[in-house]
Amino acid sequence: MKVTSTGIVNGIIQDRFGSRGTQFTKSGMAAYSLPVEISDAPEDTVSYALFLEDRDAVPVCGFSWIHWTVAGLTRTKLEENESIHAKDFVQGTNSLSGKLGNLSRMEAACYDGMSPPDRPHLYELHAYALDISPSLQPGFYMNELFHAMSGHILAEAVVSGIYFAKKTSA
């Protein structure tokens, strides 16, 4: 199986998918989601799940930052910005939910664009082919996704890209 994104060019995530973009939520979260295409999945795939993370966030906040979780996706292609309006998949909570980001579980049940505060970060988008369609509600937590997928992952693919920190004036 393979996962690709036209939003990642030569290993670089394009500006519009993060803090240098132009679309933000009321809380200031970059909201213009990456396009995704999955190919060569096993024939018995029932649905797909996506998980976008920033492991370079560990020194900054103490854990890997969750930017996007998707479950129940039955098609192989998402266009740019589909996280805003698509109703045929379920989105889980990102890391802005809770004490650190101060957003409710539902406010953070969406795509959270890249916004590295300190230096360029490497972001990984994982796609999973599943033999089930997980029964998850909007705002599900990442651990709930992984529990639901346990024993049902047919294939996994990863695409990664770097997003650069905002430039600050001297």
Image: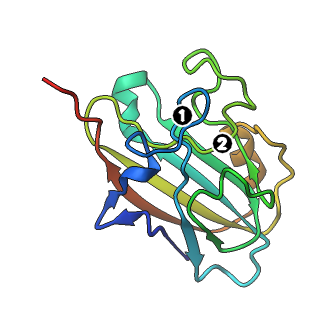
Q: In percent of the image, x 28 and y 67: which residue is there?
A: 10
Q: Mark 2 points at which residue?
A: 110
Badge 1 vs badge 2, beta-carbon distance below 8 Å? yes
3D distance between C-alphas at marks 1 and 2: 10 Å
What is the x, y in percent for residue 26? Answer: 61, 29
Quadrant in the rendering for residue 41: bottom right
The quarter of the picture where the N terminus appears is bottom right
Q: In which quarter of the image is the C terminus?
A: top left
State the scheme by which the image is colored.
rainbow
Element assignment for label 1: loop
> How many other residues sit within 10 Å of disc 1, few (<14), some (14-19) or many (≥20)?
some
Q: Which residue is drawn at 70% across and 30% down?
A: 107
- Give the residue at x 74% y 75%: 45
The residue at 31%/62% (across/down) is: 11
Q: Judge left or right: residue 135 versus residue 91.
A: right
Residue 20 visible from this viewpoint = yes
Q: Nearer the viewer, mark 1 or mark 2?
A: 1
Horizontal and vertical percent for residue 157?
52, 67
Q: In this view, does 81 lie to the left or right of 133?
A: left
For label 2, the crowd category at 10 Å Cα-Cα, with few meaning under 14, some 14 to 19 and many 20 or more, is many
Mark carried by residue 130: none
Q: Residue 29 carries which label?
A: 1
Of residues 145 and 23, the one drawn nearer to the viewer in this rendering: 23
Mark before the other along the chain sequence, 1 or 2: 1
User: Residue 150: in sight, yes or no?
Assistant: no
SS of the residue at dot 2?
loop
Q: In this view, does 109 lie to the left or right of 119?
A: right
The residue type indicated by label 2 comes to: Cys
